[in-house]
Image (tube, rainbow, N blue to C red):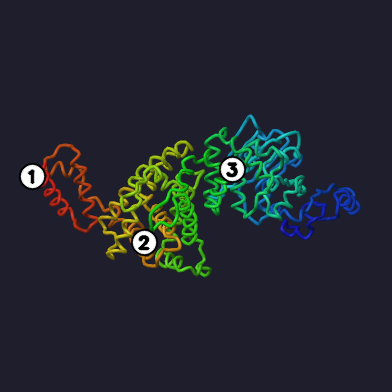
């Protein structure tokens, strides 16, 4: 009998011989007795058919079960069980064994022809990576018990919804802390009075999981979280970074950041952010800088959802601004999907990095706020200085060099699309090919991220006062830039090379110098503008450029 048909026996023990159920009962002992009456000379496998843990039937768990030594107990624990009960798919499974996790994981990897990685030798923790033909990967982590037995291991975990275990062979669920009940009631509850003090990074995890699943945090647990906040200063930057980026990757990042602020976490996690509170701005801004920043996160999440390749236009929101966004930019969903599917670091998504940039795009406004005689508030240089501040925070969080370069570019240039859209609205002029070339020359692929951020920034600036004319102007200028990047790269972004340095030195008897690079860049810029089409045009331009330089050294 196939495993998927076993669900008819949910909540009962079954006796199995050669893949066939021969007996069933409400207890293990009765199922064994019934099987012995029918097949007295054979020893059946006894399996509990759970009524609430569908992951027991998953192909991945079946693969592990088939390759694991039957005489060695193995329990699935943690988030995969939680996700299964919530109807969510998981490719990351955590297993608990009494001891010897390193050796057992290595043996399993050998039997499955999978990759093996010892994660923490001292704490008996290892990882097995299964890579499928389509490139999908399953991550299997194995660890020895935290404590004397499985019960102690579960009680030492973070939250009750993550403290449920499943016997891989029998299917029996072990839930000593009522995690399944809390899942049904949508509550995040600490496993013990010391859970948060034992590991303060769990504060961030509670907020993230509450946002991800739409759960509430139980009152006593919330009090424990507040009390444990000072302990965050002892947590490594890497662990803080990982939880932060998981939060920014998930749903409701604005609400999660607000919750972390209310708990007093930000001084330990993102210490520059509290200074944004109460910093007023001139119209058209309707919020102070802090509220504006959170609104940018909210609008950015909505924009990315509308431009996601999986977006269902039949379920389109009736909001006029959303409809205009889909109409003007919806054709770039596939390209944007590919853009965000190419992370700069395999452990963190580009999407999360963009939300981090959104958090810091106005970070230097408080320090660069000036009030003119007419009362207008300005923030000169906040983009350039903000890029440096965000870079320092990225370094403190141990982001990769590629991530830091991207972050710096996004914050440094986040105002540029606004200049394009402002001119479009006031003069009806879209960005010129020359302007587009210069924009992407200085931003590269970050230019795409900046355009999306600019739309969220604009909506957060005006919020309920945004007009259709202002929004349409922004969408038009962004569309022109995306069109050049995705549809006309050879014409506008990367024109074909007509000359090189050797050509210039040979034609004009030049020595290697900085001017050669300047000429070549000027040629490419004029190619993008449509003023240079051939090699002869390029040489003629270069000759004129040199003559002008000699006349005006």
From this viewpoint, which residue is outermost toward the left? 551
Residue labelled with disc 3: 129
Label 2 environment density (alpha carbons within 10 Å; few <14, some 14–19, many ≥20): many
Q: Nearer the viewer, residue 547 or 509?
A: 547
Name the mark nearer the viewer: 1 or 3: 1
Q: Secondary structure at mark 3?
A: strand
Pick the front one: 298 or 230: 230
Q: Position of residue 31 (x, y in %)?
A: 86, 52
Mark 1 vs mark 3, CA separation in Å: 66 Å
Q: Nearer the viewer, residue 268 or 127?
A: 268
User: Disc 1 designates what residue?
Assistant: 551
Count of numbered labels shown in the rendering: 3
Q: How far apart are the two marked residues, 2 and 3, measured between alpha carbons?
A: 45 Å
Task: Please rate how many residues cluster around mark 1, counting C-alpha atoms within 10 Å: few if below 14, some from 14 to 19, many from 20.
Answer: few
Name the side, left or right, on which 530 lies relative to 273.
left
Residue 175 placement, left or right of 298: right
For the residue labelled by badge 2, is the local secondary structure a helix, a strand or a loop? Answer: helix
Distance Cα–Cα, label 1 vs label 2? 42 Å
Q: Earlier in the sequence, mark 2 or mark 3?
A: 3
Nearer to us: label 1 or label 2: 2
At a point 72% along the width and 45% down the height, the residue shown is: 165
- Residue under the point 71% across and 36% down: 145
Q: Residue beneath label 2, please? A: 474
Would residue 249 be found to the left or right of residue 97 on screen?
A: left
Q: What quarter of the picture does the C terminus occupy?
A: top left
- Position of residue 100 in the picture relative to residue 377 (left or right): right
Q: Are marks 1 and 2 in contact (CB under 8 Å)?
A: no
Disc on the earlier residue, 1 or 2: 2
| Of pointers 1 and 3, the one earlier in the residue sequence | 3
Outermost residue toward the right in this view: 37
Q: Quadrant of residue 126?
A: top right
Residue ID at (62%, 30%): 121
């Amino acid at each position: 009998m196939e495993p998927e048909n076993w669900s008819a026996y949910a909540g009962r023990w079954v006796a199995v011989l050669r893949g066939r159920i021969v007996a069933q009962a409400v207890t293990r002992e009765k199922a064994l007795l019934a099987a012995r009456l029918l097949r007295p000379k054979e020893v059946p496998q006894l399996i509990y058919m759970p009524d609430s843990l569908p992951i027991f039937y998953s192909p991945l768990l079946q693969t592990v079960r088939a390759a694991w030594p039957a005489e060695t107990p193995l329990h699935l624990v943690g988030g995969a069980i939680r996700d299964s009960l919530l109807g969510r798919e998981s490719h990351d499974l955590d297993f608990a064994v009494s001891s010897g996790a390193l050796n057992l994981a290595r043996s399993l990897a050998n039997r499955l022809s999978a990759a093996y990685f010892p994660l923490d030798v001292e704490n008996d923790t290892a990882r097995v990576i299964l890579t499928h033909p389509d490139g999908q990967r399953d991550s299997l982590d194995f660890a020895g018990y935290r404590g004397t037995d499985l019960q102690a291991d579960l009680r030492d975990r973070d939250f009750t919804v993550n403290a449920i275990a499943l016997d891989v062979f029998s299917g029996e669920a072990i839930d000593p802390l009522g995690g399944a009940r809390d899942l049904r009631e949508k509550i995040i509850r600490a496993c013990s009075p010391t859970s948060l003090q034992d590991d303060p990074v769990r504060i961030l995890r509670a907020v993230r999981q509450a946002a991800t699943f739409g759960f509430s945090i139980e009152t006593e647990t919330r009090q424990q979280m507040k009390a444990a906040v000072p302990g965050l200063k002892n947590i490594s930057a890497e662990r803080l970074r990982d939880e932060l980026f998981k939060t920014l990757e998930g749903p409701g990042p604005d609400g999660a950041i607000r919750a972390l602020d209310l708990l007093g976490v930000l001084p330990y996690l993102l210490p520059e952010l509290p200074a944004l509170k109460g910093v007023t701005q001139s119209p058209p801004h309707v919020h102070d800088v802090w509220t504006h920043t959170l609104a940018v996160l909210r609008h950015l999440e909505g924009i990315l959802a509308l431009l996601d390749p999986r977006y269902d236009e039949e379920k389109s929101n009736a909001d006029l601004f959303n409809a205009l966004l889909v109409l003007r930019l919806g054709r770039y969903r596939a390209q944007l999907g590919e853009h965000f599917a190419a992370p700069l670091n395999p452990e963190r998504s580009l999407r999360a990095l963009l939300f981090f940039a959104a958090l810091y795009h106005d970070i230097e406004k408080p320090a660069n706020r000036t009030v003119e005689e007419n009362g207008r508030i300005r923030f000169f240089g906040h983009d350039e200085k903000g890029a440096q501040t965000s870079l320092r925070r990225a370094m403190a969080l141990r982001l990769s060099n590629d991530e830091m370069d991207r972050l710096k570019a996004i914050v440094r240039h986040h105002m540029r699309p606004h200049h394009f859209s402002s001119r479009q609205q006031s003069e009806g002029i879209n960005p010129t090919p020359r302007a587009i070339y210069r924009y992407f020359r200085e931003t590269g692929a970050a230019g795409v991220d900046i355009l999306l951020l600019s739309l969220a920034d604009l909506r957060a600036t005006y919020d309920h006062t945004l007009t259709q004319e202002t929004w349409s102007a922004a969408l038009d200028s962004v569309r022109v830039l995306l069109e050049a990047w995705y549809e006309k790269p050879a014409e506008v972004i990367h024109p074909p090379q007509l000359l090189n340095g050797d050509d210039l030195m040979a034609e004009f008897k030049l020595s290697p110098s900085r001017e050669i690079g300047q000429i070549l860049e000027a040629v490419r810029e004029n190619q993008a503008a449509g003023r240079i089409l051939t090699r002869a045009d390029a040489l003629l331009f270069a000759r004129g450029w040199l003559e002008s330089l000699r006349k005006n050294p």
